Image (cartoon, grey):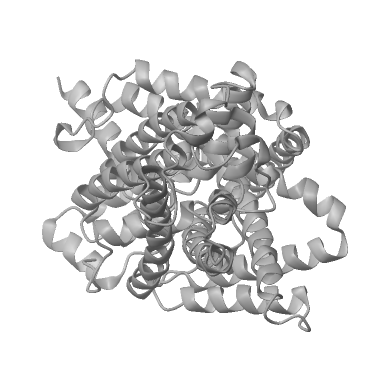
Amino acid sequence: MEKKRKGLSAWQLTMMALGSVIGGSFFLGSSVAIHAAGPSILISYILAGGLVYLILYALSEMTVANPTTGSFSNFASRELGEGTGFVVGWLYWTGTVLSMSSEATAISILLREWFPHVSIGLIGSAIIIGVTLLNLLGADKIGKLASGLSGVKIFAIIFFIITAIVLIIGALPSSPPVGVGELRTEPIMPGGIKGIAGSMLLVIFAYAGFEIIGLAATEAENPRDTIPKAIRYTVFSLVGLYILYAAVLLPLIPTASLNESVSPMVSSLERWGIGWAGRAINLVLISAILSAMLACIFGLGRMIRSLRDEGHAPKWLQDDRDVPYRGILFSGFAMLVGLGFGLLFPRVYLVLITTSGFALIFTYVVIMASHIRFRKRNGCPPEGICQMRGYPYTSWIALISMIMVLMCMPFIPGQGVGLVAGIVMVVIYSLIYYVMRFSTRSRVQNTIRKGKPIMKKQPSFVTEFSEELNGNTNEQEILSQKNDSHKSQDLLKGNPIKDNDEMFEEEEREREHYDG
């Protein structure tokens, strides 16, 4: 069916991706990465940017070939097996829900400076409910709202870069030029290779969220043109902003003095007499987290719909409307549960939160593995659009690099627990999948033993009348009955089930063989 609504443009997708990426982890979390790596953080940003480039273009190739609501979850099911698609879809959903519930807590703490008598739980709940309800307005309105909020924080970053350059060159009359500043005495790699390796994980987190482009593919105006453009804009915008930000920050403040409780922007500007920076950055931080939550709930709703369409989610989450209301509301409710759980059991919640980082890296590993299999089986996407240069070497480099990033998690304080908890969660979701599969196979087996046919959706009167006019009703009916038999046998044997088109093509090939 042709969509009557206007889809998201490349710039709206880009701003939504930037809204999802540039959140609290950038404004606060970047201080930990810069503290660990020192001036060599520039190397980390460049290397991580290269990995983001490869992952996004791998995602783009598969998305252009087949824009689907679940994006990487669907690709994993098709290329690596349904079990992998089930695990990566639910693991991503769980990690993002936990991450966004913690972001709601962060906003609540910031807002309590202005509303000290209101509890964190009440403020956080109001924020989650508000952001969830806004997502029910639809893709076009959310795209515009996310673009506006993203514009605020991008403006803040650009303002910081310009202000830092002014301080460095000494354009302010009351301030001498900073010049190279702290870089004169800073060791380039204070933590050595280990410092760079450790910071890579945190820098990857700072880039995390770009996969929203794939999840929003079905909402795009013209996916084959829009998705590649949005990915180009996102990659160059992110890498350019991050590298410039780090380059102008380093002369202004010693990296050893940075800590996660204060934004590096605030610390550096206050050090040079710009005291109002802290209050302004707090407002920007609130808008940054809000835009990240908006974009993430947008993606989570589409992920739930995709999982339901694949039969990997409960039937009551089925939603065939343009806006996946049930997936959005379910995700918002899960965030409220996460927020409440965090307030009641903070220590357990902190352990669960660390799995969000594992979930993201695991998702990127699956994307690259799916892409390698996709290209091996299909070659270039339709019309020969091969966006991944240097395949298969670049795909393997990205896959191995992301696995190495996962292995580096124990070297970062607090992330070792995340690795263990993440692996446990993968095992749990794998067990759930196999229990569901065994239950489904048992039901089908019992149905066949009782002599009952597997029910299928009956064709409409118009469809039957059209087939009669074409003179193929009986032939299609015979083939359909054979297909049901084949599907039942495949399901009992644990083989992948072929769709009707594949079955009909196989019958045609057999007929041509016997005719020959």
Quadrant containing the C terminus in the rendered view: top left
Q: Position of residue 231 (x, y in %)?
A: 30, 45
What residue appears at the point 71 percent right and 26 percent down from the top-left corner?
Answer: 411
Write the residue at 38% across / 64% down.
Answer: 458
Q: Considering only vertical position in the picture, is 438 above or below 338?
A: above
Above or below, comparing residue 453 to residue 322 in the picture: above
The number of numbered discs placed on residues in the rendered structure image is 0
Of 174 and 226, which appears nearest the observer? 174
Residue 268 visible: yes
Q: Is there any visible trace of residue 497 in the rendered image?
A: no
Q: Residue 168: name its quadrant.
A: top left
Q: Residue at x 27, y 41 (%)?
A: 65
Question: Which residue shows up at 46% across the image and 69% down it?
Answer: 324
Q: Is residue 404 left or right of residue 150?
A: right
Q: Is residue 496 left or right of residue 271?
A: left
Q: In the rendered image of this protein, does residue 309 appear above or below residue 183?
A: below
Query: In the rendered view, would you say 36 is above or below 504?
Result: above
Where residue 8 sits, quadrant-wise, is: bottom left
Q: Indicate the position of residue 60 as horizontal and vertical percent values.
A: 31, 40
Q: Is residue 198 left or right of residue 298?
A: right
Report x, y in % for residue 331. 60, 65
Residue 466 horizontal/vertical position (percent): 17, 64
In the foreground, 426 or 344: 344
Quarter of the image for the N terminus: give it: bottom left
